[in-house]
Image: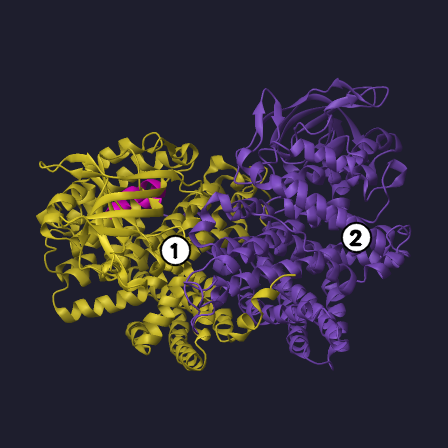
Chain colours: A purple, B yellow
Amino acid sequence: MAEYKAPLRDIHFVLNELLDAERHYQGLVGAEDATPDMLAAIIDEGAKFAERVLSPLNQSGDREGCRFEDGEVSTPEGFSEAYRQFVAGGWPSLAHEPAWGGQGLPESVGMVISELTGSANWAWSMYPGLSHGAMNTLEAHGTDEQKQVYLTKLVSGEWTGTMCLTEPHCGTDLGLLRTRAEPAGDGSYLISGTKIFISAGEHDMADNIVHIVLARLPDAPAGTKGISLFVVPKFLPDAAGGCGERNSLGCGSIEHKMGIHGNATCVMNFDGARGFLIGPANKGLNCMFTFMNTARLGTALQGLAHAEWGFQNSLAYARERLQMRALTGAKNPQDAADPIIVHPAVRNMLLTQKAFAEGGRALIHYCAQLADQVKQGADPEQRQEADALLAFLTPIAKAFLTEVGFESANQGLQVFGGHGYISEWGMEQNLRDCRISMLYEGTTQIQALDLLGRKVLMTRGESLKRFTRIVHAFCESAEEEGAIRAFVRPLQRLNREWGDLTTNLGMKAMQDREEVGAAAQDYLMYSGYVVLAYFWARMARVAEEKLAQGSDDADFYRAKLQCARFYFERLLPRTLTLSETMLSGADNLMDLDADHFAF
Amino acid sequence: MAEYKAPLRDIHFVLNELLDAERHYQGLVGAEDATPDMLAAIIDEGAKFAERVLSPLNQSGDREGCRFEDGEVSTPEGFSEAYRQFVAGGWPSLAHEPAWGGQGLPESVGMVISELTGSANWAWSMYPGLSHGAMNTLEAHGTDEQKQVYLTKLVSGEWTGTMCLTEPHCGTDLGLLRTRAEPAGDGSYLISGTKIFISAGEHDMADNIVHIVLARLPDAPAGTKGISLFVVPKFLPDAAGGCGERNSLGCGSIEHKMGIHGNATCVMNFDGARGFLIGPANKGLNCMFTFMNTARLGTALQGLAHAEWGFQNSLAYARERLQMRALTGAKNPQDAADPIIVHPAVRNMLLTQKAFAEGGRALIHYCAQLADQVKQGADPEQRQEADALLAFLTPIAKAFLTEVGFESANQGLQVFGGHGYISEWGMEQNLRDCRISMLYEGTTQIQALDLLGRKVLMTRGESLKRFTRIVHAFCESAEEEGAIRAFVRPLQRLNREWGDLTTNLGMKAMQDREEVGAAAQDYLMYSGYVVLAYFWARMARVAEEKLAQGSDDADFYRAKLQCARFYFERLLPRTLTLSETMLSGADNLMDLDADHFAF
């Protein structure tokens, strides 16, 4: 009943009309293949795969879930076959280096495909998603031999990968981790310990699984400075590069959880499993950080995915479901009631989803272009600038887009009334699946501390200024123009207020470090609303220009302007509350004794 | 692992210290039995039942769910036995008339027990909850014979009841309903049609199920003015009052849904089933409205229930889980990390839940006292006044408390990080179970239209003024006092602003009816924040008085003041946004053509 249609018109708008992909790729080194025609062809094929292969497995995958028996995990019916087609289509190799079998396209092309597959079926898309994380780690820090042995198999899709970080007693606080790595004397290590929450840790979709594992060497210093990174395959490679001896590791169980039932969340037991050091000893966390931005961007995408999915399906329902009359009189007199899309409250829910999905799309693909520049920028200064800007935007994209993605999925369910609670419509699955996104890859609260503490205050506001200068330049250039002045003025005001609030918080933090934690989440959400306002204003400007040129797609552009107006008038005023609460002081949180929260 | 402990200290605070239950019951007619000792004994027994019998079945009931086979529904293991104990304890008869076997205690006593059972296990508590709805309908509109036959069995708990309103094509819009009632010639009717979403429609916990069904007589006018109410039992009573012939109705299936898995949500097929008219023909909806307030209050309670449950369990986790150090240095140096309750972001989530749970408790039990006054008030004027005030507060309590209850359950899950997503901790169940509360008994959007359209604007603001006068009187009386002046001033300001906003909206609505729908939800949420601010200010005043008197429970009262401060400084500023968006005009919702929401 529920389905996903790739929003190709809007993706085209964001990539080409807003972000000028052609010029972007021309500015990169080694992105010659990313021509507009090539890009269009890839997106068309990706859309077909998402709509025809993955979307039909979304609800059945949730119902069936993964099964665990004797250390083996069976994925839901059709998942394995879909993965086979994904590999046959060459999708895993899209954005990886030709030296290891990749197609050498920029990261941002992969992000478009991830949007399509992730929106159609998030649980399924996590299997290649985790592989992507493992590939990036090996690409950045592996030896050529490790790349030859493992990376080529991951790039081809024959094998998949995982990231093994969390342990039962430590999630956020990786400094506490206990998994041990003993030198085996032959240059390899024997890994022992238990890892939990390992997505795609075990499954039946590929021949081998390559685990990237954080562990401690025997002489390692305590805390985060004593963590090293290892590659630990399920089957040790044989001389021919195929699957050899079974390694001493296994899946102990899979979790029963709220959603993403089609994806196996595994407890992984390493029992003296043979592993190989990646990068320098005791620098494992640093190695992780280099690709953390991309991984977090991948999770930010989940917010967009569930907002888009919820929007599409609740819009279809709102156009069909007949219930009550419009307050201003019948709009559909030939039937017994009007479609519920006539009601302002229903429109409010639909527009909320639309504004977050389309605004989020602009932010995500903008960030993906920055990631391209970090890797393939023409000069070091451009690369460094893009890196700093991406580091600033990443916690915002991750936390803000998943929070508003959850709100959107929740509104989508609400459009259905009581039917939204019933499984067959898929809306409650969309909400359950979405819920994990605010937790993994660093909770919203951790992203908020990263943004305000590490990114903004530790750079004395420099990282914020890098972005507000961009916003300011846009406002200056647009100030004299027509209808979008209504957007530029509030944006300019908020852009200034953002800086003032930051200065204010910086001064408070010097008096009391707790002020950072007390303000961080409101600060992050405030930042998210302003960032999205910038993209909505930019989109409105493009739309206005197209309309002035007499576009024959005028309805599309007018809808963009209308949605921008909705965003500025109905969502952006949330900054009023956030600017007040973030300055309300840490005392109202810290004064209450931990023993006196309840009696 | 997860558990519920009755928050007896806080319930005592609300009932006795805030709402002066003793004086309240003395002012009612026929509430002589509701003495403080009696009340305390009932609450103690109810707490034991909730903690020992219902709480252990909460998670197992979710895991197991209801099973449907050949028209029969099996409830989860232990549910039936718990119901047997509930009946043996005399709980169903608590707040019903002695003439039909009840104990004659006021409605508000029943509300306290509902809080305890509902917080411990919402899915289970819905079985007696639906019976309560059926009993109230029969009590208000049944003939003496109907009361003798059906009500006595419901009051004793031998039989249970349901409310059969919704049909596949009509939920909110009951005017569309199609179920038919044909006169059988002997004074009874033959009922035919399909009802959906019938909670407790079929189960294995009682001998008979009494359905209260909305249907149309053959000559009935179209729309809501042609709906009549019928009592339709699963088994027709025999001459001795027991279960006789099986009626022509049955459960066709049960829904697969997001949560409340322990409660059977049934499709009920009536196939010429014998039924008996309740109240006048074609006045079925009016009959329903008379007890709608109580039913909606029962759902408002669900918001409080899940906020309280989430608060208790996330507080326990936050005190035990060791992760990271406080930003101001180690608070727990003997271990490798501090308990996460040291972090301001975690405290923010805990205090949000606490503020909504405890504020919600005050509002709910205040409303329950109004319901007592409606029924048992000493004079007609008092009854009428209480009725009008309750009518105003009910949509606020229902929609606001379920919305913030969902937010609270969501925050409770978030405190657990990734573990919150795992079923064993119960936090994700709490969120899934909670989600239905914003949908049934009228969605949030319908409550909002009821509040702004019917209650406030149709009375030209009179119903609002009835409440703001109370708030104003409180502020006047408290103005000169100590620390709570910090609460009284913002409350006074908002109380005035509330009136101004209403006037403003009323004028806009005269120009364009859509303005009502466009503003209603923000108006309702705004109203909720002000109402809760009033109760938090009142609670703060009680706490301050107790502290001034030198109470030996000073920690409890200081925590109340602290939580009041948190509410005023961190949650109440949401009114800043709401007062802006509700006035932003209907155009930003209505201008977009329904065909242009997506391309």
Residue at position x 70%, y 60% from top? A10
Report which residue position mark 1 lands on.
B170
- Taking the image as drawn, is residue B462 in sight? yes
Q: Is residue B542 above or below residue B421?
A: below
Q: Is residue A340 left or right of residue A8?
A: left
Image mark for residue A371: 2
Q: What amino acid does circle 2 point to?
A: Ala
Residue B205 within the segment the image draws in magenta: no
Residue B124 within the segment the image draws in magenta: yes
Subunit of label 2: A
Residue at position x 58%, y 35% from top? A169
Question: Tag 1, which secondary structure?
Answer: loop
The local crowd at label 2, few if under 14, some if 14 to 19, many if 20 or more residues have their Cα within 10 Å, is: many
- Residue in front for this viewpoint, B589 or A516: B589
Subunit of label 1: B
Q: Main secondary structure of the magenta part?
A: helix
- Residue in front for this viewpoint, A21 or B162: B162
